[in-house]
């Protein structure tokens, strides 16, 4: 009896060691894949253009004296951050989509998968490693530009709105992850990089078309309840991001008109701010998971 128990314990211990070794191997492969994707992206021209755009935005905002202007009582660095976050909302999604959708589709066309299958790298480690590396490369220039603005503001003696800086950093992270996940899904579903690029542009265009809450007027005229119309609009992650950026300096959402009552009655200010951080991350994670499922179950070559 003791011998049998000892054998079972030894087998269990061995299985645990093998599982730990397997998990360490997956994490190592995931890190190596992420590192390789980061190095490749840092050497590419699109990253130089991407970084240059956000750096130029910050420089131009300072040059044009935006920190000296006043909007709804906001001056200094707060005013600059409001402008920066609005410009980022227009630029970041399309850049992320166009550069990401070629990840899987482009590697399929280049025959990378045939080479990858000969290596001891799991599909999950490759897919999520590639996504993690791309996320780091996408998020780095955006947050760096904002931190540069914060540093310049400190040197100029401006009052530092740390709460706004922290929340806007979270918003940028959520928006980057959201559209990165959508881009990975499109890249996995498309059979060629050209199709993936076209689908990415159409997706971005559709989200932009349904961005403005003014369009809700058409829905209301057709007899749709206001609550339903607002719910449909807030399904758009861009609209969620835009409204969250507005609510920090316009807590009553005066700019949105009557639709503000529906949003504030159902969420409250703090509730909506939390929703704006969580919802885009969920969308990006679900989209990336769908992409991984398609990637795993498709004919890779």
Image (spheres, helix red, strand yellow):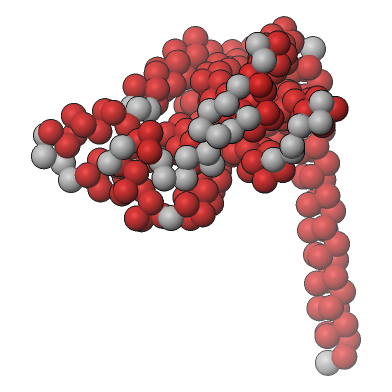
Q: Which of 66 and 264 is in front in this view?
A: 66
- The answer to whether residue 107 of the structure is visible from this angle is no
Screen quadrant of the C terminus: top right
Q: In which quarter of the image is residue 113?
A: top right
Screen quadrant of the N terminus: bottom right
Residue 135 locus on image (x, y percent): 68, 31
Q: Which of 196 and 178 is in front in this view?
A: 178
Q: Quadrant of residue 84?
A: top right
* Residue 262 drawn above or below residue 257: below
Q: Residue at x 25, y 48 (%)?
A: 227
Residue 245 locus on image (x, y percent): 52, 36
Residue 158 locus on image (x, y percent): 76, 32
Q: In this view, does 171 lie to the left or right of 143?
A: left
Q: Quadrant of residue 199?
A: top left
- The answer to whether residue 77 of the structure is visible from this angle is yes
Q: Which residue is drawn at 78% across and 17% down?
A: 42
* Residue 40 drawn above or below residue 116: above
Q: Which residue is drawn at 38% across and 51% down?
A: 264
């Amino acid at each position: 009896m003791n011998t049998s128990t000892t054998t079972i314990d030894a087998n269990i211990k061995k299985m645990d060691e093998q599982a730990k070794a397997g998990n360490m191997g997956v994490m190592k492969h995931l890190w190596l894949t992420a590192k390789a994707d980061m190095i490749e992206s840092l050497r590419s021209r699109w990253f130089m253009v991407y970084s240059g755009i956000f750096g130029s935005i910050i420089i131009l905002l300072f040059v044009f004296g935006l920190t000296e202007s006043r909007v709804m009582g906001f001056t200094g660095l707060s005013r600059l951050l409001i402008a920066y976050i609005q410009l980022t909302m227009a630029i970041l999604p399309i850049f992320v989509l166009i550069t990401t959708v070629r990840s899987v589709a482009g590697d399929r066309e280049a025959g990378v998968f045939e080479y990858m299958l000969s290596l001891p790298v799991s599909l999950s480690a490759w897919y999520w490693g590639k996504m993690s590396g791309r996320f780091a490369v996408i998020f780095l220039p955006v947050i760096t530009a904002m931190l540069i603005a914060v540093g310049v503001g400190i040197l100029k003696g401006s009052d530092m709105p740390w709460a706004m800086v922290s929340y806007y950093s979270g918003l940028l992270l959520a928006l980057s992850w959201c559209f990165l996940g959508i881009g990975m899904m499109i890249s996995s579903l498309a059979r060629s990089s050209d199709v993936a690029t076209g689908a990415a542009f159409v997706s971005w265009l559709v989200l932009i078309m349904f961005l403005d809450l003014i369009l809700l007027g058409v829905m209301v005229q057709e007899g749709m309840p206001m609550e339903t119309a607002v719910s449909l609009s807030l399904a758009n992650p861009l609209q969620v991001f835009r409204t969250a950026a507005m609510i920090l300096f316009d807590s009553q959402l005066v700019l949105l008109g009557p639709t503000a009552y529906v949003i504030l009655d159902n969420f409250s200010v703090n509730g909506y701010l939390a929703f704006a951080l969580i919802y885009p991350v969920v969308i990006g994670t679900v989209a990336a998971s769908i992409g991984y499922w398609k990637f795993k179950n498709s004919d890779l070559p």
